[in-house]
Amino acid sequence: MSVAELKQDAERRMKKAVETLKEELTKIRTGRAHTGLLDHVMVEYYGTMVPIPQVANVTLLDARTLGVQPWEKSMMSKVEKAIRESDLGLNPANMGEIIRVPMPPLTEERRRELTKVVRHEGEQVRVAVRNVRRDIIQALKELQKKKGITEDELRRAEEEVQKLTDRFVKVIDETIEKKEAELMQI
């Protein structure tokens, strides 16, 4: 692998880690409703477990209420049960044609617990990004040992990988701060 390929690989892997963090943070609920909240809640559909958005239309009824409208009438009770039994702590109400899912307000204690979860998720992704940096620098040193690059090129490449790492760690920190602010908002 060349230096340029190694740097591209590092950037791709770090970007994937940050995307994974953002995905995980959408699952942590704030006091507001958003349609992505039910994306990971699974429901049985003809013997197969599928996410709710694949069997129902999920919409915002207002800032604190989701509307879930299954495409098949027979799925109403299964979707309602899946939402109730999920780890989100929601209490759906079947209104006949649509299932209303109100978002209960978060207590101060629960908000603090969730900020700890957010920080933990962020730290895991920071570690992942640093591991990518370590792997790439190790590959660069191997390349230098095989006389593929000079010592100066190695040092320059290491600096560029460090700058890349710093950039992604900054993005992670900003993402976490934003989510914490969102959680602490009443």
Image (cartoon, grey):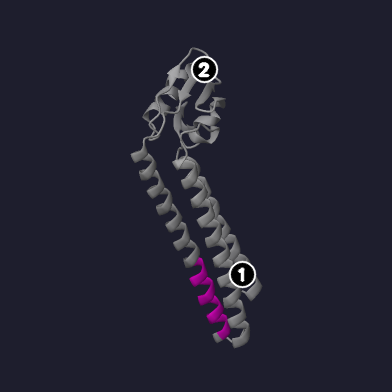
**Crowd tier of the residue under label 2, counting other residues whose Cα lies within 10 Å: few below 14, some 14–19, many 20 or above:** some
Q: Amino acid at mark 1?
A: Lys
Residue 37 visible? The answer is yes
Q: Is residue 35 above or below residue 174?
A: above
Dominant secondary-structure state across the stretch colored magenta: helix
Q: Position of residue 37 (x, y in %)?
A: 49, 35
**Crowd tier of the residue under label 1, counting other residues whose Cα lies within 10 Å: few below 14, some 14–19, many 20 or above:** many
Mark 1 → mark 2, Cα distance in angstroms: 50 Å
Question: Quick one: which residue is furthest to the front in this view?
Answer: 186
Q: SS class of the residue under badge 1?
A: helix
Q: Which segment is the magenta one?
A: 132-144
Q: Position of residue 56 (x, y in %)?
A: 54, 25
Residue for point 66% across, 72% down: 4
Quadrant in which residue 2 is drawn = bottom right
Residue for point 53% across, 18% down: 72
Residue 17 visible? The answer is no
Question: Quick one: which residue is furthest to the top in this view?
Answer: 96
Q: How many marks?
A: 2
Question: Quick one: which residue is furthest to the right in this view?
Answer: 4
Q: SS class of the residue under badge 2?
A: loop
Question: Residue 7, which numbered label?
Answer: 1
The residue that label 2 is drawn on is: 98
Q: Amino acid at mark 2?
A: Ile
Q: Is residue 134 above or below residue 30?
A: below
First in sequence, mark 1 or 2: give its number. 1
Residue for point 53% across, 75% down: 137
Residue for point 49% across, 51% down: 177
